[in-house]
Amino acid sequence: MRQFFGKSQHGDLAEAVRGLNNPQFIMLLSNGAQFEAHVKALERLYPGVPSIGCIGMSYDTCMVEEGVGIVAFLDGVSAAANVLERVSVMPVKYIKRLENDVHTVGGTSEDTVCIDFCSGNDACVLTTINTVLKRNGISLVGGTGDAGKVSANGKIYEDAVAYGIVRNLGGRVKTYKENIYRQLKNYRFIASDTDKANYIIGSLNGQPAKQVYEKILHVTDQEILTQTFQNPFGKLNGDDVCIVSIKEVKGDSLACFRQVNDSDVLIMLQLGDYEAITKQTVHNICRDFPRRSAVFSVNCLFRYKLFTERGYMDDYLQGMAALGSHAGLVGYGEHYNNRFVNQSMTCVVFE
């Protein structure tokens, strides 16, 4: 297979797709002002080609912050694209679509992946999708787009998740998740007084969540939203840790970017040696895949902001470019199999 990445910093779709012939699967990464026009134009240019899209920044060796990016797979891919609607209410109502697409594409855990773009309610969406993917051994990588909109096959949807089932006809696929944080001391909390609908943590170990965070890190209310770049929470998930970013202060509570439930066990995280960690990820991928056709990744908006503020974003993209054809999306939350995480990078590698 082969991956194409085209871009226009000014949102010129014709420029972004220049040289793209006979794609077998397309991902549109657009800006809010032009998203609808880009979706329609892309379908006119490549009618019937499975496609998904969302609003968000994209990248290969450099960032596309306000324009448009096109990622396409060709020369050895079998793919289907579709959408599950009403994700805030009942995404399972549309699960037959996913079942049919998995059956149509075929494939195995060795050569097939699901890539998704979601408008929200990510945890519920991933649980629903996983009911189909798990029994077929198919991994998932994806993320949340901006403005509550996604597209699939030339149509725009709200309150939905767009997905592509992609089979590599020329080799294996494998997904990865990168965490640049590690535990801070031995802090361990039991969450309570949570509001699941609004992703709010009211108390930690019986104390107001805001006060606990401020006391440990010696920060003020105004500093919490930037401190989360260095010190998010971690939610224990078996042997894994899912990062939980703080979104805003709500009185004595903390609103987050992902759901925390009563009795969930949380730890405090601190930023690790991110340069060494990202280089290790590249090393791991090269070890697992001596020959690589493509890498598609989703990087969190907070990672993008952190790397940019520290002058590391360009170096990071150049490091990932050592893998060969690398492109991706800056998301508002990252998906890895059935997990919704923050401040992470997830990716799929094609042999």
Image (cartoon, rainbow, N blue to C red):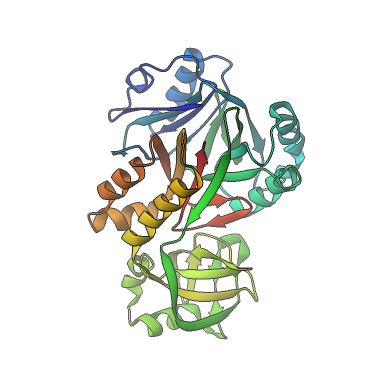
Seen from the viewer's position, the closer of residues 211 and 343 is 343
Q: Quadrant of residue 68?
A: top left
Residue 331 visible (yes or no): no
Residue occupying the point 41% across, 62% down:
180
Seen from the viewer's position, the closer of residues 141 and 86 is 141
Q: Quadrant of residue 172?
A: top right
Seen from the viewer's position, the closer of residues 350 and 181 is 350
Residue occupying the point 56% across, 23% down:
76
Seen from the viewer's position, the closer of residues 17 and 247 is 17
Residue occupying the point 72% across, 26% down:
104
Residue occupying the point 40% across, 57% down:
280
Residue 80 visible (yes or no): yes
- Asked if 274 appears above or below 216 in the picture, the reply is above
How many numbered discs? 0
- The location of residue 22, given as percent across then percent down, is 50, 15
- The location of residue 9, given as percent across then percent down, is 28, 30
- The location of residue 144, given as percent across then percent down, is 51, 46
- The location of residue 304, given as percent across then percent down, is 34, 52
| Residue situated furthest left in the rendering | 311
